[in-house]
Amino acid sequence: MTKVLGDFSPEERAAQEERLRKVWETPGGWRYWTSVNNSDIGLWYGVASFGFMLFAGTLALLMRLQLAVPDNDLLTADFFNQAFTLHGTVMMFLFAVPIFEAIAIFLLPSMLGARELPFPRLSAFGFWSFLLGGVFVCGSIFFNSAPSTGWFMYPPLATDKEFSGIGADIWLLGLSFIEVASIAAAVEIIVGIMKCRAPGMRINLMPMFAWYLLIVAGMILFAFPPLIAGDILFEMERMFDWPFFDAERGGDPLLWQHLFWIFGHPEVYIIFLPAIALMAMIVPTFAQRPIVGYSWIVLAAVGTGFLSFGLWVHHMFTTGLPQISLAFFSAASEAVVIPTGVQIFVFIATMLAGRVIFSVPMLFGAGGLITFVIGGLTGVMVALVPFDWQAHDTYFVVAHLHYVLIGGMLFPVVAGIYYYFPFVTGKKLSDAWGKVAFWLMFIGFNVGFFPMHFSGLRGMPRRVFTYPGDLGWDWFNLISTIGAFVFAAGVLTIIVDMFRPKYKLNDLNPWRSGTLEWTNNPDESWGMRSVPIITSRYPLWDQPNLQRDIDEGRYYLPDAKSGRRETLVTSVLDAEPIQCLRVGGTSYVTIVAAMALGGVFIALTFHWWITTIVCAIITLMAILYWLWTGTAEIPEAPEIDVGLGERLPIYRSGPASVGWWAMFITMVGDGTAFASLVFGYFFYWTIHEDFTAGISGPGAFWPMAALLLFLFSWVLMLAARHLNRDDNIIAARTALVVALVVTVAASVSGLMGPFTHDMDPTSHVYPATVWIISIWTVVHAVVGCIMQAYCLARSFAGRMTARYDQDIVNVTLYWHFLAVTAIVSFGVLGLFPMMR
Amino acid sequence: MLGALFVCLSLSSCSGVQSALDPAGLEASKVATLFYVMLAGGGLIWLGVVGALFYATRTGREPHSERSAGRVILWCGVIVPVTVLAALLSYAVWLMPNMRPWAPGGEGGLRRIEVTGEQFWWRVRYLRADGSLLFETANEVFVPVGERVLFVLKSPDVIHSFWIPSLGGKMDMIPGRINHVALEATKPGTYRGVCAEFCGPSHALMAFSVEAVDAAEFEDWIASRRAGRPAADPGGLELFLRHGCDACHAIAGTTADGTIGPSLTAFGARGSVGAGTLPNTVEDVARFIRYPDEIKPGSRMPSFGMLPEGDAERIAAYLKGLR
């Protein structure tokens, strides 16, 4: 069905633009920092993560200076150990992952044809959390108290107070805080891609970048929670001496390695796939044709995502695990080469079938590919168990991982910077400077890292602050150091080029790209002037007059009459418009919430318990205020005119709403963390003859009582939702009150099991595990109680009614997950000891 | 790039006492062969991909049809990699049981040497067939050429990793677990082993020497270590005991029987002091006694900077004389 496009006179258009400009305005002065616009947040995020990269790069240069000659004493062993720990940590957690969250937050709305992502304040909250956590972690080195036990934090070294100091707590708590930000970004990205695409952009018309980011955000959701679970166990051991990793009391250091690498390996692909996504946007533009093998590359990316979760043991080939499982993980590690190869050859095939224009982004792309292939080939080598026994933890692996990450991630990111610079600023970076930067980086990198293959195979282990002169490593290391500085000169060249004064382009689409983002005017903060109907993967190539029609406001949402920030929500597969979503605007609450939450983590590091509690209360208040004033608002009218003669509802509830999806996705991540704790329980059970070590369990009575009470409160929540929908408000409120009381009783029962059986969590890992699973469940129940109270308050305040019931629907969704958590935890704790 | 490869290869004769590419053991030579096979194959694949990339990015070329480009994805991205990887994986998995057995416990008859990684040195205990202790030494391992020896690997503090690149791959030493690795030296010589898992401030300073000697020489060495030796310099021993060194260190044939630090029996025969940190000379040993924490950060040995002038040197000379 063809739609009749709008038609406005120039005066009407000017008035529309005036209103749009006002609604989407970025505040001026110091209030600028309260902005939640995706273009501001994306930019800050990008600049901050780039800054952290430079910081970590500087640490690397210091390390290279120390290693330039044997028996050097430029750096102390302790500083060197802090430097390499921070280098790895910062590059992974503060650069490689956040830079893609930055790019995604900046680009996705424009690529998808949305005005904004669905939760702009969540993006802002994530950014401030990330910045605070990052500064906290990095700053520690200036006080000589940075973590110094490696970015992998293996216990017992990292649980040993004498050798790890406060640095380990800074690592655990600072990064847990940043992981919260990453998960927030993942929720934002998934919901944005699934629900906020332009009308007509069916799932098979999505730009490659959106596909990749959808996959990567999904991976974050399953990869980060095991690390968070591991962090919790780790911090419980450090703070309260619960022996999860202490072999003398039944713990096992290997559990941490499993949890860490279940996170750590997907992490590599979480970093790598978005870089490939950038290439998938760049290559078609310069090959001047659509990508060849769209479904090949999507399937390959999905395949890589899945396989990446089955490889983690290849980081543990020398820990003495059974050979048969090593062989299995070796095969899985080789298998992941295949989807990766498909993605590379999709690019080559696209170039073959097109006419290639050479440019700086392509130069970096090609250089990255050439480099990455070497990293891929050495990856094939180290994935073979016998070879890994020699190469593991040597400079060979240092070379391998830098070839993969710099070739597979940094070069494509620089290609992306050159490609998207005009999109961000309306100006172009210099071709001449770009070529100089490329050759410095490319030559410097290879000179720096290629010799490491050989120093490694000649026996040089990783993470050594010095080495003797008679082992034949001197020349390799000196050459590596020289190369590293040439490489750094290349990075510096790019920075100079960015800050050089440049002319404004008078062309929105200087590369003649085909994708939707290039219709946006970087000088306007409204994103799309009007939200177009999309019928092609490369709309700018295939849809005539698209740019003109968008700019003349002939499509959806050309106006902002209500004075609110509005964007379209469409259906998940076919992108039919289903809602006009009002998103949150400029606000302080995000900064307050992020700073207060940061305060919780920082105060915990120093064991300032009272500050911790105060900050936690402020965080809770800020979040409640944020939700109360900014979400599930009852609109002035049920429907609104969105242009093209259509009217859409403003308020949706249940699976049609973005809030429901956000809750669902968050709880999937939360459930993964819980599953990791339960994995720990069974892990201990499998490594010991008798996991309980003769210590009495929580019994069956209290866990079963807790289980039944939780189920009862869940049924009450279902009833409350149902009664509220039937407009039986009094009954619904009563059900909520009873549910709240029952939840409290359930929580108390949950803790009574280990309490009445005198289970001392510091005595052995079995009571510690029982306690941690019980506490996890009860903490979730407490959050559930707060949600119930919130629903009651909303009902009394008239902000939740039979028709506008998003709050209770989402809370009930939370309760589904809580019920499953309770069944699993109390089922396992209460019944499993009897089944042995 | 090829130039860089060539330069690197020619720079490295690959030889060395700690080189995986200069194998002197069964496992190491199998892995070195595997590496050269992969290096050749990998080089060819890399050249192919880069060649394809250069061809594809050539300007002024007629575009290929989408169909033929699609065939490139199928063949180069799927069929060829699957074939090559299947062959390579079979080769590697076939190698595995030749190097380390599928199931542990199949190596009961081997000579056993128990090595414990400690921050930051190696406790080495030669065991009898029944598992009882023959004698203990530190930071040095003697192995007979041509005989498979089982290393029993433990750690009391943090994770270390036992690695003799010339003989074979590494194996971690994990608190609460006992790992095993069997290695066989094929060439007599002196090699160097190191800790390969980051274990704290002085991880870089945790090496040991490996002597591969023929069977007869090995038996002589065992016998010489088991026989008690009279003290070379009674005055040095007296100082050693007076300053309390025996609280941590043992010397066979004397009353010193501490077990916290490395055994110093036959210390003079070792090539280094501080687990490969300094050469074994009187001055360096004396320096180590006075300032262990400066030389080896995080070392558990207290410093003896307060010893009267000459005492450390006298003790060092005494230790140097122990054979």
Image: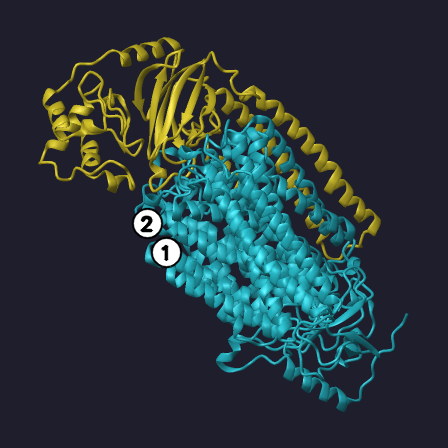
Chain colours: A cyan, B yellow
A75 with respect to A699 (left or right): left
Q: How far across and down, in percent of the image, does residue A362 sit?
A: 65, 58
Residue B323 in the image: state x and y as whole percent: 23, 18
Is any part of residue A289 visible from this angle? Answer: no
Res. B218 visible in picture: yes
What residue is pinned by disc 2?
A75
Q: Position of residue B247 (x, y in %)?
A: 20, 28
Query: Chain for mark 1?
Result: A
Q: How many marks?
A: 2
Residue A416's image quarter? bottom right
Q: Which mark is residue A607?
A: 1
Whether A662 is drawn above or below A244: the answer is below
Secondary-structure class at tag 1: loop
Residue for point 34% across, 23% down: B124
Other residues around mark 1 within 10 Å, as few (<14) / some (14–19) / many (≥20): few
Out of A405 and A659, give the one closest to the viewer.
A659
Q: Is residue B123 left or right of residue B178?
A: left
